């Protein structure tokens, strides 16, 4: 059992403040990589919640490794986002206020293979033709990123 599951065992679905990291990953055509998330049944950026003792950088590198099976990436911190607009209620009722470190990530010469545990597939989309079914958090991050 991980840290978040342990905390949820104590707090139930009450709102928690959780640190997370997300990745803006683009291909050579400047298209954005999205993953289809099994927990929310929609498209989002690669990323996830921090484990105990991790830095934001370690968190996003772990998430990229877990979700996309990519071990070699370069990172550039874009910004850190938080506040009321980063509140999310999961389909199971769990509530979170996220503090999100957004990174621009360059994958170095590796083929992507999804994990099929947390995500079912990935796809690149052009900025002007994004999928309709995007997580609220991803919409907020992209709005800030493209301002």
Image (tube, helix red, strand yellow):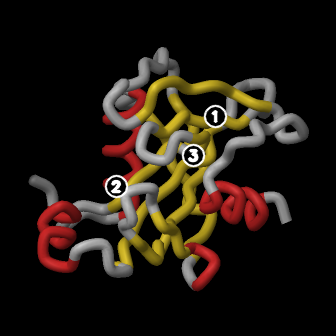
Kindly state the secondary structure of the residue where label 1 is placed: strand
Q: How far apart are the alpha carbons under marks 2 and 1?
A: 18 Å
Q: Earlier in the sequence, mark 2 or mark 1?
A: 1
- Residue at 36% x, 25% y is 116
User: x, y percentage for residue 18?
Assistant: 36, 73
Q: How many marks?
A: 3
User: x, y percentage for residue 127?
Assistant: 83, 40
Work out whether residue 81 or residue 3 is closer to the camera in this orientation and state it. 3
Per the image, the residue denoted by label 3 is 45
Q: How far apart are the alpha carbons under marks 3 and 2?
A: 14 Å
Kindly state the secondary structure of the residue where label 2 is placed: helix
Which of the labelled discs sits on residue 59, or is there none? 2
Per the image, the residue denoted by label 1 is 33
- Residue at 47% x, 72% y is 98
* Residue 130 in which image quadrant: top right
- Residue at 63% x, 34% y is 33
Q: Earlier in the sequence, mark 3 or mark 2?
A: 3
Kindly state the secondary structure of the residue where label 3 is placed: loop
Q: How far apart are the alpha carbons under marks 3 and 1?
A: 7 Å
Q: Is residue 139 above or below residue 74?
A: below
Query: Disc 3 vs disc 1: Cβ atoms closer than 8 Å?
Result: yes
* Residue 118 in which image quadrant: top left
Q: Earlier in the sequence, mark 3 or mark 1?
A: 1
Q: Is residue 132 above or below residue 69?
A: below
Residue farthest toward the top in the current orientation of the protein: 111
């Amino acid at each position: 059992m991980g840290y978040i599951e342990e905390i949820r065992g104590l707090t139930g679905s009450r709102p928690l403040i959780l640190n997370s990291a997300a990745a803006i990953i683009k291909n050579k055509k400047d298209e954005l990589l999205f993953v289809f998330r099994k927990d929310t049944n929609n498209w989002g950026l690669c990323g996830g919640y921090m484990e105990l003792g991790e830095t934001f950088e370690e968190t996003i590198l772990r998430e990229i490794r877990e979700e996309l099976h990519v071990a070699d990436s370069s990172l550039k911190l874009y910004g850190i986002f938080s506040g009321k607009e980063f509140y999310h209620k999961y389909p199971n009722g769990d509530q979170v206020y996220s503090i999100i470190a957004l990174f621009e990530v360059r994958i170095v010469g590796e083929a992507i293979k999804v994990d099929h545990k947390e995500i079912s597939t990935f796809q690149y989309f052009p900025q002007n033709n994004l999928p309709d079914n995007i997580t609220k958090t991803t919409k907020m991050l992209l709005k800030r990123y493209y301002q």
